[in-house]
Image: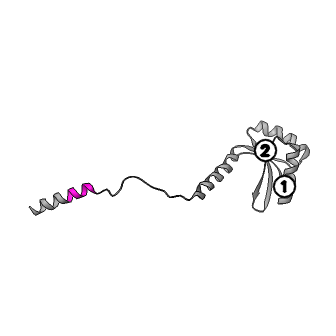
Amino acid sequence: MKNIYYSAIFFLCASYIHAQDGNITIHQDAKIQKLLEIYKSTEEDSDDFQIQIYNGTLSGANNQKSNLDADFPSWKTKINHVDTDYRVRIKDIKTALEAERKYLEVRKKYPSAIIITPK
């Protein structure tokens, strides 16, 4: 009789116990979201062709970028920092044909320009 009594109490208590709800709460620092946005913005450029016109010091890169912006004001340009070098690139070129056309135009003023293909 005692076994039945203890078993009944055990099963009644066990039915009210909820050890796991299935809900997960993640407390995330706001800086992580900012890092993800930066990462996504750098990954967006990987699908496009780019034309690199300069590779060197920061002052030279700033000079070349301002010259490039003056020569081709409608094109989007950027300065990338890789290791110890700074690279000036024309970005947002969607197709190989468009990259080749812009390359031929840029090559007249910047003979060291090269086309960077997407990954």
- Looking at the image, how many numbered discs can be counted on the residues? 2
Amino acid bearing label 1: Asn
- Judging depth in this view, the residue of 22 and 119 nearest the camera is 22
Image: magenta residue range: 10-17
Mark 2 lies on a secondary structure that is loop
Residue positioned 80% across, 57% down in the render: 86
Q: Is residue 11 magenta?
A: yes
The percent position of residue 27, horizontal first and vertical second, equals 50, 58
Q: Would residue 113 be found to the left or right of residue 81 on screen?
A: right
Residue positioned 78% across, 37% down in the render: 98
Question: Which residue is farthest top?
Answer: 97
In the picture of the structure, the residue carrying the numbered disc 1 is: 62
Asked if the residues shown at circle 2 and circle 1 are in contact, with their CB atoms under 8 angstroms apart, the answer is no
In the picture of the structure, the residue carrying the numbered disc 2 is: 76
Amino acid bearing label 2: Lys
The percent position of residue 118, horizontal first and vertical second, equals 71, 45
The percent position of residue 44, horizontal first and vertical second, equals 67, 46
* Residue 41 shows up from this direction: yes
The percent position of residue 108, horizontal first and vertical second, equals 91, 43
